[in-house]
Image: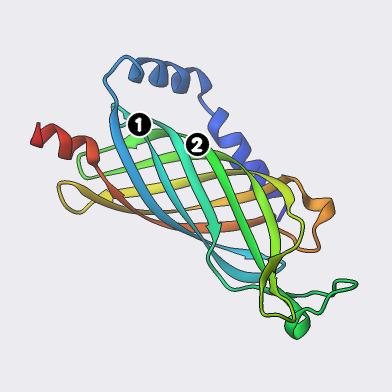
Amino acid sequence: MKILIPIIFVLIPFNGITQLLDDMKQSFESKPKVMLKLGTRNSFISNRFVKIRDVQIGFNYKNITKIGLGYNWLATDVFRPLVIEGQIVQENKGELKMRYLAPFVEYTFLKRKKYSCGIPVQVGFGKTFLEYRNESNELKKTNSISIAFYEPAITFEYIVLKYIGIGGGIGFRLMFIGNRRLNDNFTAPFYLLRAKIYFGDVLKDIL
């Protein structure tokens, strides 16, 4: 099952590839709108439930293609045993930190007046490390490990107010750099919740 899930999500974006590329190409001919998304992805790290927050900013082309950049970070307190030779680590544990930037692209395959369904894909590049306090109560961190993810998903979005939308979806996080150097397993399914502000529409009405 764990193998089938990422395979399914990899195949979905290529279903009807000709139509997808034509739609995206035509959408780039329109004037883009600025968009800002705040989201939470609920997932697992080594079978433990965690929350990953993200802030995304980008451009919306005709409500068909969205591209941009997001900042992601682990928002759940996760502690791991930590022993460092020659140092005293308080409580012999460190807090797991994970932060990464992720360029993204999203294709909307179903669009109605109040709701839409899309296929967002993002590739994240960042670092993870353990943060701890030494005998002097100074905040320290271990050497960081470079990580990279591939995260495809299927999402639903509903416009609740003129400038505000909410949404959710399911996806899979596949780590392709860093797995061998980490004691934790970051590859896992996730479900997400999002709030979206339509800045393009706000600016259009103001100006």
Seen in the picture, residue 122 relative to 92 is either above or below; the reply is above
Seen in the picture, residue 206 relative to 181 is either above or below; the reply is above
- The colour scheme applied to this rendered structure is rainbow
Q: Position of residue 113 (x, y in %)?
A: 20, 39
In the image, taking residue 64 as reference, residue 101 lies left or right, namely: right
In the image, taking residue 115 as reference, residue 90 lies left or right, namely: right
Q: Residue at x 55, y 70 (%)?
A: 76
Q: Residue at x 33, y 44 (%)?
A: 36
Q: Residue at x 81, y 79 (%)?
A: 88
Seen in the picture, residue 174 relative to 138 is either above or below; the reply is above
Residue at the disc numbered 2? 104
Q: Position of residue 10 (x, y in %)?
A: 62, 37
Q: Residue at x 73, y 77 (%)?
A: 134
Q: Position of residue 79 (x, y in %)?
A: 68, 75
The kind of secondary structure element at disc 2 is strand
Numbered badge on residue 59: 1
Q: Position of residue 63 (x, y in %)?
A: 30, 32
Residue toward you, 171 or 139? 139
Instruction: Name the kind of residue labelled 1 in the image.
Output: Phe
The reply to whether callout 1 and callout 2 are in contact (CB within 8 Å) is no
The kind of secondary structure element at disc 1 is strand
Q: Looking at the rendering, in which quadrant would you find the C terminus?
A: top left
Q: Earlier in the sequence, mark 1 or mark 2?
A: 1
